[in-house]
């Protein structure tokens, strides 16, 4: 028992010493390289923005084309806007949501 | 100052190139393809059991993409490995040689990236129809949804599917264009400082110069990362086509 207590206190002192020396910092924060982390955030924002807009653009183009075919000038394009928004959000959720 | 002037197409290969509209973008594409082929010929010529530097580089590239294919697509990924590797190597080399002065970054043109993305899109749709026949259309019907919602959800799924080539191409094109424009803008600051402030401006222009040097590192990362992203998204789309979920 005495042996175990010594070992415990040694572990505690080791953790305290390592913490004081800053040796355990790498474990607590996943990526200490702030430049790389910042770039990842920009990259993520860029990706999600494109994801959101692309579906919208496709939907509006389809609506515009159908309007040309059916001579219903603005209405199909307007109707496609919410569909495009929904599709964009669907892509967004697929990109960042929980893995399948 | 004309930050977008660097993306202007001119004709290459002298008068012969001018007569058939062979552009500097085409030159860069040929250079990228030639570098890849020469690298592989040189690297694999020795075929040593313990690889040298060139052979190690070639083998690492090969195994990296091979692993990515199998991890993402599954066992069927081996069939698509040549396509994914070609795309990855072509885009990677295109991004990388675009970083050098006097070279042209052909991936900064949406005409190029959209063509590549449309090819991937049409190919993966074709693979879907080839493996599943017309049952591939069930890909657009989400599972576990009441029937009365389907008229609304199926168009949404179709549009989100059609948006794939757009987001794939715009991502690559925008990243490359933004990086190159940023370089030119910071270089322009140096010119403005020296023209406006004289000797003090020359000293102060060390700041944009330093930023440009830092940007080289960032752009190197972006060039590799975007080639990787393009390749892994190609794998993901092929996974959807093969497995339908």
Image (tube, coloured by chain):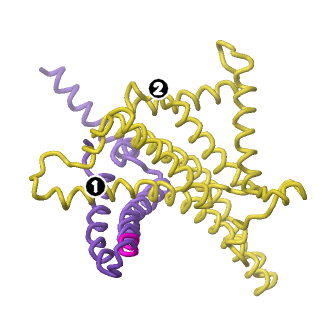
Going from N to C along the chain, the mark reached first, 1 or 2, is 2
Residue sitting at 44 percent across and 58 percent down?
Answer: B167
Residue B236 located left or right of residue B213: left
| Residue A78 visible | yes
Cα gap from disc 1 to disc 2, whole angstroms: 28 Å
Q: What stretch is highlighted in magenta?
A: A64-68
Give the farthest residue toward the front: A70
Q: The yellow chain is which one?
A: B
Residue B79 located left or right of residue B240: right
Q: Where is residue B234 in the image (x, y as percent from the top left)?
A: 46, 43
Vertical relation: B162 (above or below) B126: below
Chain for numbered disc 1: B
Residue that label 2 marks: B78
Give the farthest residue toward the top: B49
| Quadrant containing the N terminus of chain A in the rendered view | top left
Q: Position of residue A30 (x, y in %)?
A: 37, 46
């Amino acid at each position: 028992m005495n042996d175990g207590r010594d070992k415990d206190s040694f572990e505690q002192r080791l953790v305290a010493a390592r913490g004081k020396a800053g040796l355990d910092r790498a474990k607590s924060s996943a990526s200490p390289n702030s430049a790389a982390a910042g770039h990842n955030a920009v990259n993520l924002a860029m990706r999600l923005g494109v994801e959101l807009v692309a579906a919208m653009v496709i939907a509006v183009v389809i609506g515009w084309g159908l309007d040309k075919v059916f001579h219903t000038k603005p209405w199909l394009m307007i109707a496609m806007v919410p569909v495009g928004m929904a599709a964009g959000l669907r892509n967004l959720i697929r990109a960042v949501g929980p893995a399948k | 100052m004309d930050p977008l002037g660097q993306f202007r197409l001119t004709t290459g290969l002298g008068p012969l190139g001018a007569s058939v509209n062979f552009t500097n973008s085409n030159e860069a594409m040929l250079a990228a393809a030639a570098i890849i082929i020469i690298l592989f010929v040189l690297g694999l010529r020795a075929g040593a059991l313990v690889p040298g530097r060139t052979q190690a580089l070639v083998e690492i590239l090969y195994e990296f993409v091979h692993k990515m294919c199998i991890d993402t697509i599954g066992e069927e990924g081996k069939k698509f490995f040549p396509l994914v590797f070609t795309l990855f190597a072509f885009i990677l080399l295109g991004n990388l040689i675009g970083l050098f002065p006097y070279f042209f970054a052909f991936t900064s043109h949406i005409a190029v990236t959209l063509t590549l993305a449309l090819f991937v899109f049409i190919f993966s749709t074709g693979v879907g129809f080839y493996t599943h026949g017309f049952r591939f259309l069930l890909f657009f019907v989400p599972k576990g949804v009441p029937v009365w919602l389907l008229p609304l959800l199926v168009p949404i799924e179709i549009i989100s599917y059609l948006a794939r080539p757009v987001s794939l191409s715009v991502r690559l094109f925008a990243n490359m264009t933004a990086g190159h424009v940023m370089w030119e803008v910071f270089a322009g600051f140096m010119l403005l400082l020296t023209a406006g402030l004289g000797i003090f401006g020359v000293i102060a222009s060390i700041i944009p110069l330093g930023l440009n040097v830092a940007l080289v590192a960032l752009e190197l990362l972006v060039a590799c990362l975007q080639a990787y992203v393009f390749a892994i998204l190609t794998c993901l789309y092929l996974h959807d086509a093969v497995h339908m979920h």
